[in-house]
Image: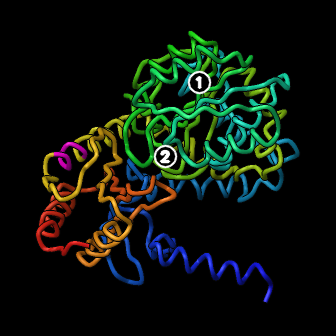
Amino acid sequence: MPFALDQIDTELATLDRELLRRSIRSVDTPCGPVIQIQGRSLLAFCSNDYLGLANHPELIAALSEGATRFGTGSGASHLISGHHIIHDELEAKLASTQSGAIPNVRALFFSTGYVANLSVITALGLIGKKKISIYSAALNHASLIDGIRLARGQGSVDLHLFDHHHLEALDDILRNDSAPHKLIVIDGVFSMDGDLAPVQKLLHLADQYDALLMIDDAHGFGVLGKYGYGILEDQRICSDRIIYIGTLGKAAGLNGAFVCAHEKIIAWLIQKARPYIYSTASSPALAFAVLRSISLMEGEKGQELRIRLQQNITLWKKESTFTRWKRLESDTAIQPIMVGSNETALQLARALDQFGYWIPAIRPPTVPKGKARLRMTLSAAHTKEQIEGLCNVLSELESSLPPS
């Protein structure tokens, strides 16, 4: 047996012993509050389909029409023959969503948010071949962390981690840093805790110390702001220092991602962002459907769905009265239930599953050791009865579930 297979067996056994092994559950039905797994119905409180658009009939029709008109695949990377006129139309629309926040804005469409983040950070690390200091929030998404790792491998990069709840230390580090290029990197909405980044304060530091500010708003685009344009619209922020990343596989109900920034930064990405340059362009049919999704999100329907989502968040916070586990304070659709140990998280997730609720346990390394949780998420598609039912079951389990 090859040496790698023996070592894999050993390490998988360690993951099993530490209750850290991940598994895949295959869903039989379209994304929605009620799903089926192996023919069994479950109420899902775990997807990022915040507006309930992932199975919307208009998006299904748009994807079908897009495939009929433009084909199913792009056939090549954007810089060869894979960039279609519908990609141009989509990028113009995406840029318009951030035109009030970023002067001289231009957008670039990516296949995933992960690839977008890798592309931006590695490309910025190549500007002028000079030293760059990257300041990253300690709880940032894995794609931002991996982008920084790649950037460090290609040149002179200093990494500084900071606590986004306490920016005094970041101020001190920036003040004493003589690097010619500085980049502050942050999640707009933190994916595991659900809290918002202090963007206005970070922008003040970026202005003061001549830094760029990169915001991964994966969980804010479509949800925050009157028109769903995200955290910049919501917090009424405008600056040419901002590099904004939005994703289209969460509130938008499809998949893909985009970067909005000053047109010169986008021009640089086209030249230097290797994950973008060497990836096959996303399907033009997808681009066509995303245009329809944005139209829904920014229109009356989207505003109605955001109001409904906020009502569901308010209801959950009112009705979730359990004290055995800690509910993190969050005003977003991400409402974590903190339990602490891996064993307790798995125990609670399995108990909920028996009652017909699907909320997976999130364990290290996705979250810090000792901070395992159930990452509960709400959607505009959830009903009052479904949310109240979950709260009732949690109250019952609080008293009936034995200590782990």
Quadrant holding the C terminus: bottom left
* Mark 2 secondary-structure assignment: loop
Q: CA distance from mark 1 to mark 2?
A: 24 Å
Q: Position of residue 113 (x, y in %)?
A: 61, 46
- Write down the residue under mark 1: 213
Residue at image coords 29%, 59% = 339
Q: Position of residue 387 (x, y in %)?
A: 21, 57
Does the image show residue 1? yes
* Mark 1 secondary-structure assignment: strand
- Write down the residue under mark 2: 252
Closer to the chain start, of discs 1 and 2, is 1
Determine if the magenta segment contains residue 315. yes
Q: Which residues are magenta?
A: 313-317
Residue furthest bottom as drawn: 1
Local packing at callout 2 (Cα closer than 10 Å; few below 14, some 14-19, many 20+) is many
Residue furthest top as drawn: 208
